[in-house]
């Protein structure tokens, strides 16, 4: 059976550095400090193999190798990684589509906790900041809040987001200002509630996005659209928010 070659990012802050694996050109001042390095593995190819299965095969060879995953079906959003320079969900990325040796790194721009596991705290803080839930001012009806089929259709392409973070961690504006720019994932969610006929907090939501950073740091480079594994379009959602702001201001 054919072997697949992968070169994976290793960083284990709680371990002693391995002299044989440390990059030769490293210029960190403290030589005892653990350093990231790329480690090559070979795993056996399987028919229809996805990148997640190859990572699991690596874990069988080296149980200290760490990456997040759960559903294996492109639903939970936990196994975002960067493969050959592009963010993706490992579980729905076919090995056959990737040039070897496959370079697998953590999602860019986030602090690395260990190997492919990054700290997504800031990403979730930006998500929380857009109040991602329906806000009603009218008293709640006895039963459901009704919505026409046409209004429901406006949520297509928005509600499907699984918060994998592939988009925000591909966005240069988010890399440079993760504490100030909401990033494409959170802004897609902002539009998801602005576009919802049942929500009654349009003014407050738009006011909260004022200023040079939270919304307007997006420069429409569209990295986010290219990497979204669900085929969503955060750039378009951001554009709709800007249009609505303009409409509301005249
Ligand atoms: S279009 Fe905007 S949100 Fe998307 S990657 Fe570019 S700057 Fe970031
Ligand atoms: S918009 Fe797409 S890439 Fe971004 S978090 Fe949602 S599903 Fe992931
Ligand atoms: S493991 Fe859940 S989306 Fe990939």
Image: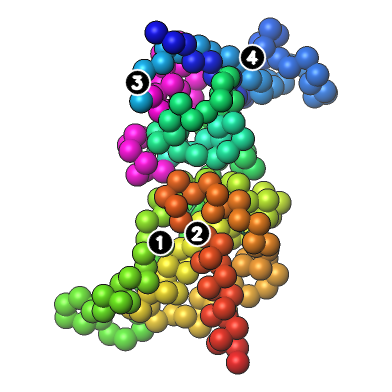
Mark 4 element type: loop
The quarter of the picture where the N terminus appears is: top left
For label 2, the residue is 233
Few, some or many residues within 10 Å of mark 4 (<14, 14–19, 20+): few
Of marks 1 and 3, the one in the foreground: 3
Marks 1 and 2 sit apart, C-alpha to C-alpha, by 7 Å
Residue 71 on the magenta span: yes
Q: Residue 47 carries which label?
A: 3
Residue 50: x and y in percent read 40, 28
**First along the sequence among labels 2 and 4:** 4
The disc, 1 or 2, on the residue closer to the chain's N-terminal end is: 1
Marker disc for residue 16? 4
Magenta-drawn segment: 49-77
**Quadrant location, the C terminus:** bottom right
First-in-chain label (4 vs 1): 4
Q: Report the magenta stretch's main SS.
A: loop
Pointer 1 residue:
157
**Disc 2 versus disc 4: nearer the observer:** 2
Q: Distance between the residues labelled 2 and 3?
A: 32 Å
Secondary element type, mark 2:
loop
Cα separation, mark 3 vs mark 4, equals 38 Å
The answer to whether residue 170 is magenta is no
Judge by depth and name the residue closer to the eye, 24 or 53.
53
Left-right relation of 223 to 19: left
Residue density around tag 1, few if under 14, some if 14–19, many if 20 or more, within 10 Å = some
**Is residue 68 shown to the viewer in this render?**
no
Choose between 22 and 87: the one closer to the eye.
87
Give percent across and percent down for residue 105.
59, 30
């Amino acid at each position: 059976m054919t072997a697949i070659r992968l070169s994976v990012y290793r960083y284990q802050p709680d371990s002693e550095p391995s002299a044989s694996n440390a990059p030769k050109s490293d210029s960190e001042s403290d030589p005892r400090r653990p350093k990231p390095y790329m480690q090559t593995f070979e795993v056996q190819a399987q028919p229809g193999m996805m990148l997640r299965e190859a990572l699991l095969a690596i874990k069988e060879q080296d149980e200290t190798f760490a990456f997040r995953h759960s559903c294996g079906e492109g639903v939970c959003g936990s196994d975002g990684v960067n493969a050959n320079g592009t963010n993706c969900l490992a579980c729905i990325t076919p090995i056959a589509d990737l040039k070897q040796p496959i370079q697998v790194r953590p999602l860019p721009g986030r602090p690395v906790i260990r190997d492919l596991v990054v700290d997504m705290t800031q990403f979730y803080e930006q998500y929380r900041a857009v109040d991602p839930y329906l806000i009603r001012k009218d008293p709640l009806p006895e039963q459901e809040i009704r919505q026409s089929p046409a209004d429901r259709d406006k949520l297509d392409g928005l509600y499907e987001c699984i918060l994998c973070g592939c988009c925000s961690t591909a966005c240069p504006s988010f890399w440079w200002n993760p504490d100030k720019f909401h990033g494409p994932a959170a802004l897609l969610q902002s539009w998801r509630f602005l576009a919802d006929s049942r929500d009654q907090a349009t003014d407050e939501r738009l006011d909260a996005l004022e200023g040079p950073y939270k919304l307007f740091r997006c420069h429409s480079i569209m990295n986010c659209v290219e990497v979204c594994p669900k085929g969503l379009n955060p750039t378009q959602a951001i554009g709709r928010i800007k249009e609505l702001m303009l409409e509301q201001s005249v």
